[in-house]
Image: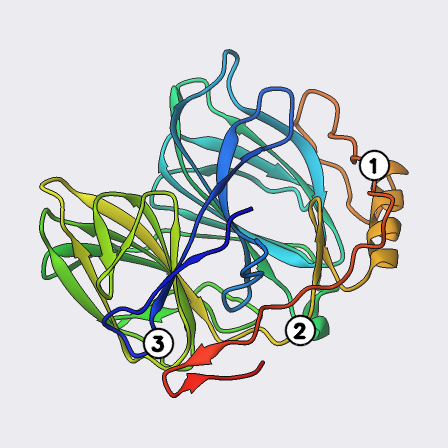
Amino acid sequence: MSDPRVAQAGSATGVEVLPARDVPLGGPRALRVRRTIPQRARTLIGAWCFADHYGPVEVPAGGMDLPPHPHTGLQTVSWLFSGTIEHRDSLGTHSLIRPGELNLMTGGHGIAHSEVSTADTTVLHGVQLWVALPDADREAGRDFQHYVPEPVRLDGAELRVFLGSLEGETSPVRTFTPLLGAQLDFEPYATVTLSIDPGFEHGLLVDAGDVRLDGTAVPAAELGYVAPGAGTLTVTNRSDGPARAVLLGGPPFEEEIVMWWNFVVRDHEEILRARRDWEAASGRFGSVEGYHGHRLPAPPVPDVIIKPRRNPPRRTAAGPGVV
């Protein structure tokens, strides 16, 4: 796994570019995704603990099919650029995930869900994001929220705020820690300066275009990270075609977490308990009605103790600091 390429750019904090790595998303007819967090250099951005970017890719023969699988200790955020996915979960939700529409699922104590591309979907393109729940809320009950943000015109760009607040737009979706999630679509050669919360750290996940974040190039499928302290971010599309990116943010998440498979927990023993509960088909995760097929079995747990991780010491606008 490569280290981030650190560039001191136009902001006081500089921009770290976090490279992506290819990861197979489990299931018999699944997709390969490009993952930027977590990685050795950075576990979280705010409470965002997982960022996958995929497509545009033709769906496999028979469609994308991710069987019922469990989650605990997190919220999943599904956001598409193209294609449609059918979502079912053990709360009883049956919903479609469409471009520009947020689906947020809470699996604190435990939830299960399936994701299957619709018959008319030939290309899938989007991001899959996870949010770690703070210790006080990580046993929260199952929940599901759907929201369609209105696109807002900026000078040279279009903005959709699906979580938190940005440029006067606020999402009503409930989260357990302050968060920012927004899609930005740029016209050719556009430059946009965004007013941001200086208490947040931010990550710009680039989908397409020749994008500069505070003067630093962030390649497609990679993520530019900015530490807390900055009051603005300047994003430039230097290409003669459109560009698109997803901006994530939140105050630094000070808790250590353990991530394994689909679980966000605090220690190795919790992993073992969650895996046993899933394999035993206990009531903890419930059942997904309407999915025709077998659920996804849990992989073996590595024969080592999986230790908690937190972010490295962070920098601020005032200079290097210690977490």
Q: Residue at x 87, y 50 (%)?
A: 272
Going by the numbered disc 2, the residue's amino acid type is: Glu
Identity of the residue drawn at 81% across and 62% down: 267
Quick check: 196 above or below 302? below
- Whether residue 67 sits left or right of residue 272 in the image: it is left
What residue is shown at x 32% (from left), y 43% (from top)?
A: 220
Residue 148: image x %, image y %?
36, 51
Q: Amino acid at mark 1?
A: Pro
Earlier residue among tags 3 and 1: 3
How crowded is the residue under tag 2: few (<14 C-alpha within 10 Å), some, or many (20+)?
A: some
Residue appearing at x 77%, y 46% in the figure: 285
User: Height in image: 56 above or below 102?
Assistant: above
**Drawn side of residue 92 relative to residue 207, left or right:** right
- Residue 293 is at least partly visible in this image: yes
* Mark 1: few/some/many CA within 10 Å (<14, 14-19, 20+): few
Quadrant where the image shows the C terminus:
bottom right
Give the labeled residue for mark 2: 255
- Front label number (2 vs 3): 3
Question: What residue would you read off at disc 3?
Answer: 13
Residue receiving disc 1: 300
- Give the structural element (helix, strand or loop) at label 1: loop
Earlier in the chain: of badge 2 and badge 3, it is: 3
The quadrant holding residue 25 is top right
Residue 316: image location, x then y, percent: 42, 81
Work out whether residue 10 or residue 201 is closer to the camera in this orientation and state it. 10
